[in-house]
Image (tube, grey):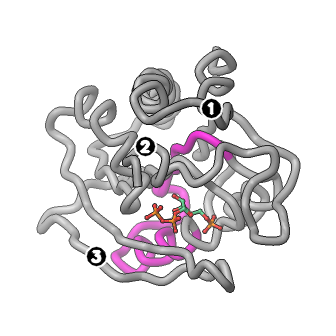
Amino acid sequence: MYEGLLSILRDRDTGTAEFRRASDGLAGLLCADALAGLRETGAGGLMLVPVLRAGLALLPSFVGALPDAPVAFVGVARDERTARPDLYYTRFPAVMPSRALIIDPMLATAGTACLVAELLMREGYSADAIHFAGVLAAREGLDRLARVIPRDNITLAAVDPSLDARKFIVPGIGDYGDRYFGT
Ligand code: PRP
């Protein structure tokens, strides 16, 4: 279901406008998929947690499907040399619903997603109440995140086999945030 849009995103020759169109289409599918899984768990309220910046690319689809859902913002940037996540911004709503959905297109080492999951746990969420929706993971990142939150809570369009020396997903999509925002 995701393949046609993913191949547009993977293509190095895809420009900003086409990348955005494909990403927006894929976000709609991913949102439907993630929310179907959540409904199976009998979810109450849901807080959306886009990870800045790239998570913002997926946010409009989720806000469209859940017009009442509060949104928490978490800013994390990977250090380009060490690939370690650096937390630079958090903003949580005053009232937080029973479940949280982390939104970030890329799961590479999963350092970022695990850091955000730990932040949510400090805010009182159990691992079972934390979900993740993303476009592409590396196998080792998915395995790492699945040791922190249940595998059934993780929705992805695709899983690639490996990471390169710079901890980029291979074959991957490149830097999703840079490509979506035309950086
Ligand atoms: C990218 C991506 C994830 C993270 C994934 O963000 O959007 O947040 O890296 O890598 P990890 O699983 O190894 O932690 P980046 O740090 O490039 O920031 P950006 O969203 O501002 O581009």
Q: Secondary structure at mark 2?
A: helix
Q: Earlier in the sequence, mark 1 or mark 2?
A: 1
Label 3: how many residues lie within 10 Å, few (<14), some (14-19) or many (20+)?
Answer: some
Q: Is residue 115 magenta?
A: yes
Badge nearest the viewer, 3 or 2? 2
Q: Earlier in the sequence, mark 3 or mark 2?
A: 3
Q: Which mark is residue 180?
A: 2
Q: Earlier in the sequence, mark 1 or mark 3?
A: 1
Pick the residue in front: 161 or 100. 161
Q: In which quarter of the view is residue 17 placed?
A: top left
Q: Which mark is residue 41?
A: none
Please provide percent x and percent y for residue 16: 43, 35
Please provide percent x and percent y for residue 83: 66, 78
Q: In which quarter of the view is residue 62 placed?
A: top left
Q: Secondary structure at mark 3?
A: strand
Mark 3 residue type = Thr
**143 lies left or right of 24:** right
Q: Is residue 69 magenta?
A: no
Q: CA distance from mark 1 to mark 2?
A: 13 Å
What range is drawn magenta here? 114-136
Q: Residue at x 32, y 42 (%)?
A: 59
The residue that label 1 is drawn on is: 13
Q: Say if residue 40 shows up in the picture.
A: no
